[in-house]
Image (cartoon, rainbow, N blue to C red):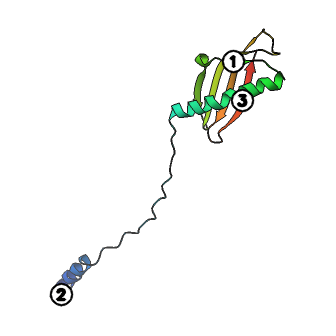
Amino acid sequence: MIRASYPCLALALLLAACETPPQSVSRPSHTSTTRITVDPRVAAKAASNACEPAVAEALRRRYPQPGSVMLMADREQIYQRPNAQTSVSGDGTFEPDGSSASISFHYTCLYNSRTARVDDVQMRY
């Protein structure tokens, strides 16, 4: 009887090896998140374009009837900050009452590219 057990055991092992392998569980594919990257030059230009009128408006709030306002584009500095913010700093001059006397100032403007709005304008005279 022992001899009969060996062939049965061999047959059982052979059948076990021939079984269909377990199917792999398919995992749901991750939905791809689209990340929009903006060219830093485009972001800087948008920030600069948004900050110019915001700085002029801040001057109008402080001086109700300013004369000409001139921002010096060659002194503008733009820095990328965390949380989709861009800092624009620069210098300018304006006439507080329409006279020929002008006042120099330094400004810092914080632009948020997510909202496409200026969050803050700070000025030093």
Q: Residues within 10 Å of mark 3 (few under 14, many from 20)?
A: some
Q: Quadrant of the image for the C terminus?
A: top right
Going by the picture, which residue comes out furthest to the bottom?
1
User: Which residue is at the front of the view, 48 or 111?
Assistant: 48
If you read the primary sequence from the N terminus, does the residue marked by circle 2 or circle 1 appear first?
Answer: 2
Q: Is residue 73 above or below residue 51?
A: above
Q: Nearer the viewer, mark 2 or mark 1?
A: 1
Query: What residue is shown with label 1?
Result: 70
Query: What residue is shown with label 2?
Result: 2
Query: What residue is shown with label 3?
Result: 54
Q: Quadrant of residue 99?
A: top right
Identify the amino acid type marked 2. Answer: Ile
- Tag 3's secondary structure? helix
The residues bearing labels 2 and 1 have C-alpha atoms spaced at a distance of 106 Å
| Residue at x 47% of width, y 59% of height | 30
If you read the primary sequence from the N terminus, does the residue marked by circle 1 or circle 3 appear first?
Answer: 3
